[in-house]
Image (tube, rainbow, N blue to C red):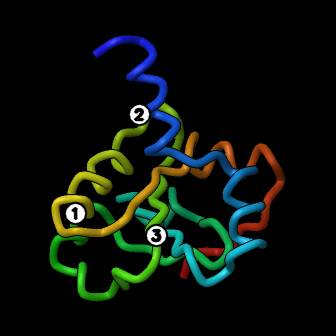
């Protein structure tokens, strides 16, 4: 794969928090944010506002909760975390349209976008 192909594929498979916020304003019913982080409650205190939480290890058993009519936007902790990429593979193998939120919740927080407490 050439560098050009790599970067084109990366852009096609990801969405930045800023681009997501703009796209969600334009087409609010097109996207579903899914938090795929696996973590004990004392570590996972907040999530992106409105996101559905389905831990990666539960995702294969909970696919029926996700509509195929929407683009599923998955996220995890940060750029060093690969849970969202693993979730994207599972979803793509099951015929979902999926994007990865670049930088995970860390990039979302850095933009001061809305979050909510995890129950």
Q: Secondary structure at mark 1?
A: helix
Above or below — where is 5 with respect to 115?
A: above
Mark 3 neighbour class, 10 Å CA radius: few under 14, some 14 to 19, many 20 or more: some
Alpha-carbon span between mark 3 and mark 1: 21 Å
Query: Which residue is tagged 3?
Result: 71
On screen, residue 15 versus residue 93, left or right, reads right
Query: Which residue is tagged 2?
Result: 9
Q: Which residue corresponds to the image point at 29% horizontal and 61% vertical from the top-left? A: 56
Mark 1 neighbour class, 10 Å CA radius: few under 14, some 14 to 19, many 20 or more: few
Which of the marked residues, 3 or 1, is nearer the chain's N terminus? 1
Alpha-carbon span between mark 1 and mark 2: 26 Å
Q: Which residue corresponds to the image point at 60% horizontal and 52% vertical from the top-left? A: 105
Q: Position of residue 58 (x, y in %)?
A: 23, 71
The quadrant of the picture occupied by the N terminus is top left
Query: Which residue is tagged 1?
Result: 57
On screen, residue 98 versus residue 22, left or right, reads left
């Amino acid at each position: 794969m050439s560098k050009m192909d790599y970067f084109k594929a990366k852009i096609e498979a990801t969405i930045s928090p800023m681009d997501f916020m703009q796209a969600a304003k334009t087409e609010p019913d097109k996207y579903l944010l899914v938090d795929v982080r696996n973590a004990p409650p004392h570590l996972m205190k907040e999530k992106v506002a409105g996101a559905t939480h389905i831990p990666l290890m539960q995702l294969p058993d909970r696919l029926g909760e996700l509509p195929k009519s929407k683009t599923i936007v998955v996220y995890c902790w940060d750029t060093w975390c690969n849970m969202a990429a693993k979730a994207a593979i599972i979803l793509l193998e099951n015929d979902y349209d999926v994007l990865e939120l670049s930088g995970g919740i860390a990039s979302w927080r850095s933009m001061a976008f809305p979050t909510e407490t995890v129950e």
